[in-house]
Amino acid sequence: MSADNAASTSAAAAHEDSLQPHEIPPSVHQVDAWEQKHLPRLQYDTLDHAVFRWSLADWSWDRLEKRRQKLFSPEFKCGGHNWKLMLFLGGVVASDPGKVSIYLVCTSTAKENHPCAQMAFSMSNPNDPTVYLTYNSYHRFTPHDDDWGFTYFCSSERLRTESASGRAVLEDDHVVVSVFMRVVKDSTAGGVLWYNLGTGCVSPAGSAPSCFAWSKRADNRRSLIHMSLASLTANAISLSFPWTTTTRWCLSCSYCPRATTGLMNMSAPTFGVGCLNLALQLLNMIAPFRMAVYSIPTIKNDRRTAVPYALQRLFYELQNSSMPVSQTDLIAAMGWSDAWLRRARWDVMDYIRPILAALEEHLESTPYEHAIQDMFYGQTEAYLAGVAGGSHSAEMAPFDALDLDVQGYPDIVRALRASREPLVMPLPTDSNGFSHDYGHASCEPSTSDLSRQPQPPRDCALGTRLRALPPVLVLNLRRWRWDAAGQSPTKCEDRCEYPLELNLREFVRPGTAAGPPELDHLAKYDYVLHAVFLDDGHADGGSYTALIKPRPDAFWCKFDDQTIIPVEDGSVREPYEGPGAAYALVYLRRDRAKEFLAPLEESVVPPQIRELRCEWGTDAEEDGPIQVRLVGKSEFKRHMGFDIAGAGEAQRFEARRDETLRDILPRIRKMYKRAVQIRAMVKRHNRAVRPSKIVPFQGATLDMTLREIGTTYNNFMDETYLLFYVEETADMRREKPFDKTKRLIFLKHFDIPNESLRGVGAVYVNPHDQVGAIRDRIRKIMHWRNSVDVEMLEEVMCDVPQHIDIRKTFLQSNFETGDVIAFNRRYVPPPESAADASGETSAPRAPKYPTLLSMMRSFERPAA
């Protein structure tokens, strides 16, 4: 069943909360006025529009709520599909009664026809249509995700609460349920509008952030979602769920033109490797560059040609493989260590520059000797000239990227103009006070120079000019600045727009300082946007993704390591500002875009690389290597932040897919000497990665291959590695690790003064115990006195904490193995300072870890 979308689809609050004090709410019968306020029109063409009303009268609501009655409305049509409303009186989840749940169900979805609908639900008073409650959302309806709505639409008590007009929504057991809906046109190439990665559908993703919206009521839906996933387990392989076989699924799409194979992030799963993957995808897109790489004579296992050989093989696998491709050979050939890759901040050019430098010497004496210079390098002229004229000095230099300041500039055109503005400064003088006559100096001083008297300093202009632009133009947007007060880099999230098409004629002064201008071809200055690189993070970490257009006539794709999904064209304009703003742009010259993005024939690939296809194809699909990653107590305690552990904190080793658990058990015990059992870590529907089922060290499981374990326990992570949580005896001295009736709960301490969230241990709990009983165990772990008041939150997913009702049992609160409880001493705000008492306001301090703001605010805000 679908999850609520209230967190990110601009869901409207109840109308009493959103109206001004004296504003008259529109009636639900005034369709145009009501939709103008509560169903904002999106930028998509509307195919059909409908309003359906369902009157529920003469019902005993108290009886139906106690029975948690599920009701279905009559069917209606809109956009060529059949629809109906599904209403749960008393809520969906038995352990959390007193809620009203409502969903829109499409009963006629077909495999190739997925309607995209925007809808607004309303429950209104039958006698006063201006009294109502409403929420809105949008969704792509598919055979595997055919309903969408709100698990917590409102409370049963809210229906009976009188509004400002003195009337309640539910009156005399009578209410009108309405849905206002628009079926919109999916104008994206291949049908990618609002695709939901979390449901395993067969068409690609569009608006990923909105499709994965989980509100703070996520725990109320957890049991239902796991129920629906369990019913689909048998079909998981054929449906090709994105979290297990994302790349293979992308390749099955007939409209994916090329470059739809992802790159692994397994040898050193860090931000550096993620950035390297984007650099390699960008280089792989450029056909003349691949041609140049393929032209280099290489020999397997020859250190002298290790870099071009690794690139040849990697490019060929990206072009033909149905599995994610490893870049470990290239990393080894370049001599990059894990420590070097784990640097906090990266730029895509940090990888492109050394790769290009390593290739240039190999391209000598080949037809592509000057290919790299011709494609990636332009010319700038640094000059120093007197403001009043006369003096002038200039020096030419190549460049591979232009650095632009974004702070204070609304778009890159203005940032480019500002970067070309010269700096006016006094002309440098020698020790005798003479001004240097730049541009006219000779080797020997003349008599006139010796007889000159010192002159007052003259102003000069120091700046740079663009002489020539490369066909592949990289613009680096300076998003990071050093904060002297905090002694750390801070991210500039200012809005800076960039166009899809860019003309740079005003910024280029063709020719050289010594010669006449070259023939000015206007086509040289027309550029089209090819790639947008995004850095969604802060100074201590983040994630690197890119939006790249594989061909001029294709749609945009989002590249994120192994995952590549098509996105809407509008998604390219979203990273103008905010935490995930663009930090680099790549433009291609318009007149060469088709040449650069053209496919290559198989014949240009060296024969020794083509012969490897059978080898790596068989290895990858049958018995090729896979990585086993292990997370234990020590990794959990070292981890700072959400989830159990970071990607780069796990222990790991390589194994073959046909190896059994018995074969790798000695390696596990070598890393964790007290290991007694392991649990498969799985990616939940809300993207949280948590321990789940036990993989026992006994019985038939010992003889299962890693391929079988990954399929059985569903802990394949993008087909590239298996992830396990290792339980050690130190965790469970007084527990029964094989008692299936107990649940493993992870505990984290949130230290508000230090703004840290770290694991302290994992404990087994009886599902029938009250949640509040775990506070005694927390005090014992933390060595706190029994009088310490412990406040707890559940970490539902990253950035989504939720208060816990300590009077309920773990079963009633839907706690299951792998859930995380964050705790702290009950927060007491610090006393007001003298400055506050005097009315002065101090500047707000920047948070140490911005990603923990939601957790901090939840602790500071009492439970409702």
Image (tube, grey):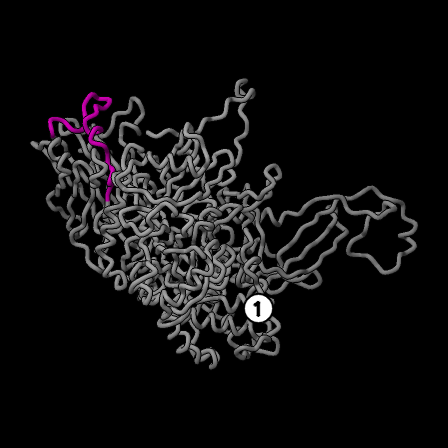
Nearest the camera: 359 or 367? 359
- According to the picture, the residue beneath numbered tag 1 turns out to be 372
Please indicate, yes or no, whether residue 551 appears anywhere in the rendered image: no
Please indicate, yes or no, whether residue 270 appears anywhere in the rendered image: yes
**Residue 593: % across, % down:** 46, 65
Query: Which residue is pictured at 36% across the width and 56% down the height?
Result: 677
Q: Which residues are magenta?
A: 149-173
Q: Secondary structure at mark 1?
A: helix
> Residue 156 magenta-drawn?
yes
Q: Is residue 166 above or below residue 49?
A: above
Name of the residue lying farthest toward the top: 838
Q: Is residue 752 above or below residue 43?
A: above
Identified by mark 1, the residue type is Ile
**Residue 757: % across, % down:** 46, 41
**Residue 379: % across, % down:** 63, 61
Query: Which residue is pictured at 39% across the width and 68% down the height?
Result: 663
**Residue 66: % across, % down:** 14, 34
Query: Which residue is pictured at 30% across the width and 22% down the height?
Result: 21
Q: Quadrant of residue 558?
A: bottom left
Q: Is residue 833 above or below residue 783?
A: above
Left or right: residue 554 compared with residue 272: left
> Residue 383 magenta-drawn?
no
